[in-house]
């Protein structure tokens, strides 16, 4: 029957028994199909009823304000990426506003409205960068819902397996989940216990350490980065003898981040034999003698013997020793000089780049703000000021160790001196919203770029950061830049109109962000009436009313 319907009854005669005298073949075919459908439906046997899912867990967070809920529905309904090409128009990019909205909602401690959970999980499925914030906002009900749809199984891998974690003070429940839970559940449990009690987390990890797989041991060991302290040293020292090289390397890295650890002391002794002041140069030059071998003790302490392709063995070993040595080693070793004075010293035999790069890694690992500031240097200095100058990637990591205000001041001065061509990486580590001096420096640099006559697409990365990171209060100051400027002789054709659109989009995005934050703000509580005033209001009738 299907074949006859597809090809037509003129080309394929329906099977015998369907044709009836006096009826056209098409009508007879449709009658036979209807009869067959009824017969098949009537022959179905009822299936057993499926087990009802368990009730969704309770979410004790506060309810989302109604205006914010409407805004979230709007953002989730328009998640499509902007059209390709250089011209984006003046409308805000809602795909970039959703992450900001989720971050702000999580800061306020709101729960996700139940009707938006499916769309929220769909958005997180499509964009991996949304998942941490989206799953945090979805909460326990989002994980419960994800268990009912295979398309949302990513949520179970990234969280606690769809199961609520037990109270970290309930030793029996914690032990049971640790021994019987899925890997994702155990990772989440260890992180929760670590945040509550570091010693209890180490004891939990030690109880099954010998029976864990190497890749699992590596993940569990990485959780000790949170709240790392000297009390973790004995466990990490034992991990230096682990049968997995990756586990040994991670343990050594964590120990080197503890300047008072025994491993840090051993590395300091080794590094000190390699770096010293050159006495023949009047004590004003650093001399470097890289290691000639990588012995078994060095390898046990995390030094990888085989260098990557294109890297010399001795420089590779030297870099690992210096980055693992406490930075407090060098003022004592190099004549009592300050970090700023040490960084400024010349280094013999072209070892400056290697030595300074290792100090940069040490400053980042040990979170030493003073050494980071010394290695960064002055932001107005030339970008290639000579040997030892850190790259932009290294500068970004060093900046991340500085306090937020100092970080913003340095980047603002860097942009004022060098413009925006190399500012994207260092801008990415600044706190959001940008401090006023940093925001002003970025806007001024964009204005200068516009006056230069180029297209705004060359600065699309910085413009996108500005839309996400500028303080929304700066919108009114940017209004003057939305006008189309007069095109100069050397300006690119139509560049003024494109810049006008870009600044209009920036202003509208900032205003939309301000509205979003206002909608998420908790409504003020009504003023409370004192007991005496309430009594007077009840007891005294209005003027003209009968008692």
Image: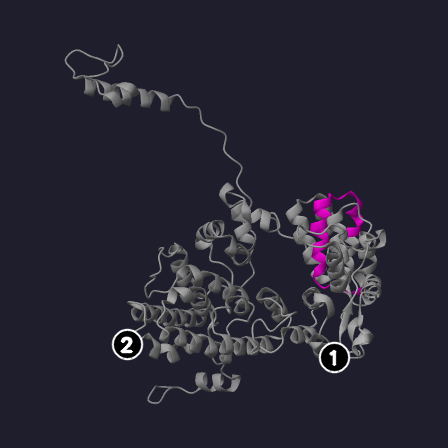
Q: Is residue 526 visible?
A: no
Indicate yes or no whether the magenta region holds residue 320.
no
| Residue range corresponding to the magenta coloring | 205-230
Q: Nearer the viewer, residue 289 or 417?
A: 289
Q: Quadrant of the C terminus?
A: bottom left
Q: Secondary structure at mark 2?
A: loop
Q: Tell me if residue 223 is in the magenta stretch.
A: yes
Which picture quadrant has residue 288? bottom right
Looking at this view, is 366 or 178 the one in front? 366
537, 144: nearer the viewer: 144
Rendered location of residue 103, percent (x, y): 51, 64
Crowdedness of circle 1 by 10 Å Cα count: few (<14), some, many (20+)? some
Q: How is the rendered protein coloured?
A: one colour
Residue at 76% from the left image edge and 70% from the top image edge: 327
Provide the secondary structure element on which disc 1 rests: loop
In this picture, is 222 found above or below 12? below
Task: Tell me the residue at 83%/63% (across/down).
Answer: 270
The residue drawn where x is 72% and y is 71% is: 347
The chief SS type of the magenta part is: helix
Q: Earlier in the sequence, mark 1 or mark 2?
A: 1
Q: Which residue is mark 2?
A: 486
Q: CA distance from mark 1 to mark 2?
A: 53 Å
- Horizontally, is 245 left or right of 517 in the view? right
Query: Residue, x 48% and y 81% (percent of image)?
Result: 527
Where in the figure is residue 43, as x and y percent of width and height?
39, 21
> Label 1: which residue?
338
Residue positioned most to the left = 22
125 over 64 or under it: above or below: above
Instruction: Give the image quarter of residue 476.
Output: bottom left
Task: Give the image location of residue 505, x and y in percent.
Answer: 36, 68
């Amino acid at each position: 029957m299907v074949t006859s319907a597809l090809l037509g009854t003129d080309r394929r005669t329906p099977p015998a028994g369907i044709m009836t005298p006096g009826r056209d073949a098409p009508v007879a075919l449709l009658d036979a199909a209807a009869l067959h459908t009824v017969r098949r439906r009537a022959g179905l046997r009822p299936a057993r009823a499926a087990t009802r899912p368990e009730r969704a867990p309770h979410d004790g967070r506060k309810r989302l304000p109604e205006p914010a809920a409407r805004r979230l529905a709007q953002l989730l309904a328009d998640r499509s990426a902007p059209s390709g090409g250089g011209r984006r128009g003046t409308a805000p990019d809602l795909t970039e506003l959703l992450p900001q909205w989720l971050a702000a909602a999580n800061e306020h401690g709101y729960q996700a409205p139940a009707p938006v959970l499916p769309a929220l999980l769909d958005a997180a499925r499509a964009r991996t960068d949304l998942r941490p914030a989206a799953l945090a906002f979805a909460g326990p009900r989002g994980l419960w819902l994800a268990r009912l749809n295979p398309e949302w199984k990513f949520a179970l891998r990234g969280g606690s397996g769809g199961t609520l974690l037990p109270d970290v003070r309930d030793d029996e429940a914690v032990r049971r989940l640790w021994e019987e839970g899925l890997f994702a559940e155990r990772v989440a449990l260890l992180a929760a216990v670590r945040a509550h009690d570091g010693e209890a987390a180490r004891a939990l990890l030690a109880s099954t350490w010998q029976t864990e797989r190497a890749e699992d041991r590596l993940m569990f060991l990485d959780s000790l980065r949170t709240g790392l302290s000297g009390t973790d040293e004995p466990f990490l020292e034992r991990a230096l003898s682990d049968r997995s090289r990756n586990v040994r390397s991670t343990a050594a890295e964590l120990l080197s981040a503890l300047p008072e650890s025994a491993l840090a002391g051993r590395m300091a002794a080794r590094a000190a034999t390699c770096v010293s002041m050159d006495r023949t140069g009047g004590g004003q030059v650093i001399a470097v003698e890289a290691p000639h071998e990588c012995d078994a003790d060095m390898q046990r302490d995390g030094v990888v013997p085989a260098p990557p392709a294109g890297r010399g063995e001795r420089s590779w070993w030297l870099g690992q020793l210096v980055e693992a040595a406490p930075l407090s080693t060098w003022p004592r070793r190099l004549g009592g000089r300050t970090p700023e004075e040490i960084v400024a010293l010349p280094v013999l035999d072209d070892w400056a780049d290697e030595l300074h790069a290792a100090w940069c890694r040490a400053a980042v690992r040990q979170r030493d703000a003073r050494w980071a500031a010394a290695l960064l240097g002055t932001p107005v200095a030339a970008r290639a000021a000579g040997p030892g100058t850190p790259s932009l990637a290294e500068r970004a990591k060093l900046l991340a160790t500085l306090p937020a205000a100092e970080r913003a001041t340095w980047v603002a001065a860097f942009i004022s001196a060098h413009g925006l061509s190399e500012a994207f990486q260092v801008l990415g580590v600044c706190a959001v919203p940008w401090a006023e001096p940093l925001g002003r420096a970025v806007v001024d640099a964009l204005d200068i770029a516009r006056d230069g006559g180029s297209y705004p697409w060359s600065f699309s990365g910085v413009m996108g950061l500005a839309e996400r990171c500028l303080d929304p209060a700066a919108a009114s100051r940017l209004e003057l830049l939305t006008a189309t400027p007069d095109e100069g002789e050397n300006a690119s054709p139509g560049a003024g109109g494109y810049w006008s659109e870009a600044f209009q989009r920036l202003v509208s995005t900032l205003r939309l962000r301000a509205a979003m934050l206002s909608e998420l703000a908790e409504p003020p509580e009504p003023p409370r009436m004192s007991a005496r005033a309430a009594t007077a209001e009840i007891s005294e009738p209005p003027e003209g009313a009968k008692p």
